[in-house]
Image (cartoon, grey):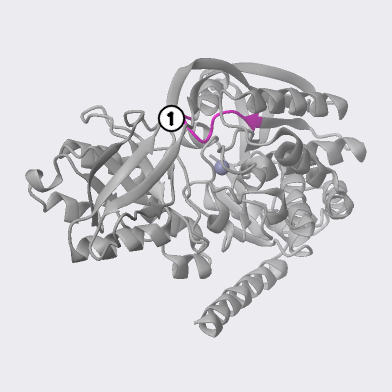
Amino acid sequence: MRLCSIAVVALFFSLWVTQAFGQQQTPQLGLTSASSPAPSPTPIVFSAQTLADLKRLQEAALRSDYAYRQVAHLANNVGPRLSGSAQAAKAVEYVASELKAIGCEVQLEKVMVPHWVRGEETAALVQFPGQAENTTQKIVLTALGASVATPPEGLTSEVFAVKNFDELKALPREKVAGKIVLFNYPFDKQMAAEGRAGEAYGEAVVYRSDGPSAAARLRAVACLIRSVGGADYRLPHTGLTDYANDAPKIPAAAVTAEDADLIADLARQGLVKMKLVLTPQTLPEVESANVIGDIKGTEHPEQVIIVSGHLDSWDLGTGAIDDGAGVAVSMEAANLIQKLHLKPKRTIRVIAWMNEENGSAGSKQYAKDHGKENHFAAMETDNGAGHPIGIHIKGKPEVKKMLAPVAAVLQESGAGTLDLVEHCGADIEPLEKAGVPSFSPIQDSRFYFNYHHTAADTLDKIVPKELAENSVVVAVLAYALANMEQPLPR
Ligand SMILES: [Zn+2]
């Protein structure tokens, strides 16, 4: 098993290398000689000065520990930053003051956010085949974000498992009514190991978002899902559930992969009853903010390049990889541009988004307030802090060609791949949909979903060198976009 996955990974690495060499050999648009009598001269995309500055940024980012110090402060000193919490408010204050200190023009832009707080969360199997007298089996779980509560003393009911939506739909309503439904849909760890963790997540996460309402439509009294993630340490993964309007809201929690297998195994053998206590609360909305820090462009200040990550996090861990890292590398891009006294021609706008995890209120508010502005490009880092191998591009295929000289610079730190994709980031999605060319680092996310939304999303999961490599991608791309000699095609 182990050798097999290493071989697959090796294959992927060799593919990346091949791709990267291919890119290095393509003629650099930025270096077209003015004297060559080409019939239709290729327009210069990057000046020699810009390309030299990109190299300086790359070297400086690899030497700097600024990004690491930022994520360390957010994770260790501020802590978990769920929307509406005192820590989220403290994080807003902190990032604003840091961005001011490096010379950005800073705005706090008001966002009303949901305020959901976790309560008690316990579960035990109180009846099951082969049970020893006067015993129960503890079940490890965590409430899903937005979940409603059980009665304070809990509820006790039969629990049974289905593999997927089809299996649930095939059941008669009386089989489901009054029961606790468990969706035991596994996260595909092999797919993640092969470098397609995002796809594996996408396949499984629909049970977290839509499972509770699907169960409620058949009159289930509570819904459990198998945690969406890859680790084997009996850790539950939280995350938002999305109650539909046409179904009653029922309590919803994620059990660990191990506990999901346990329940499914016992339920196959006979009647299993669970006592479930979940006491989360939804409090009134709270005023919070997106933190916005601009370095104004010297030639086209009205043209904006967004460089961003989200400041809020789930509450179980300390939000280091999701997404303190994304905020930190975005801050680092601005920090390095200022430190090297570089002058971006277009405006570079660092945004620390609020409420990505449970509502995207920050993203929606920004789109409302700034939708009519001239956004040249948008970037978001929200896939952890693993080694980056290049850049995802949501845009016209020509964008990829234009950025070949940037890829050649990035290849020196192992990040020379340019890949066209359909989607780059949750917070920049409204801009993507409006046709703004969008970007995100391609990060090694083979291990990301082992920790994602768990108590183990903590600072130690970040390798400082890999974080710095992400800073390289973000800083180099941001400055390249700001100083391109041509507009990006739309
Ligand atoms: Zn995130």
Q: Is residue 391 above or below residue 84?
A: below
Q: Quadrant of residue 303?
A: top right
Q: Is residue 296 above or below residue 317?
A: above
SS type, badge 1: loop
In the image, what residue occupies the spot 50% across and 60% down?
A: 197
Residue type, mark 1 in image: Pro
In the rendered image, residue 109, in percent from the top left (x then y), is placed at 64, 17
In the image, what residue occupies the spot 68% across and 41% down?
A: 324
Residue range highlighted in magenta = 352-359
Is 400 in front, or is 205?
205
In the rendered image, residue 288, in percent from the top left (x then y), is placed at 60, 19
Left or right of 403? Residue 208 is left
Q: Quadrant of ligand 1?
A: top right
One can see residue 208 in this view = yes
Q: Quadrant of residue 162?
A: bottom left
One can see residue 143 in this view = no
Q: Give the residue at mark 1.
A: 280
The question of residue 67 being in magenta is answered with: no
In the image, what residue occupies the spot 53% across and 78% down?
A: 5
In the rendered image, residue 417, in percent from the top left (x then y), is placed at 64, 62
- Principal SS element in the magenta part? loop
In the image, what residue occupies the spot 63% across and 36% down?
A: 80
In the rendered image, residue 344, in percent from the top left (x then y), is placed at 81, 34
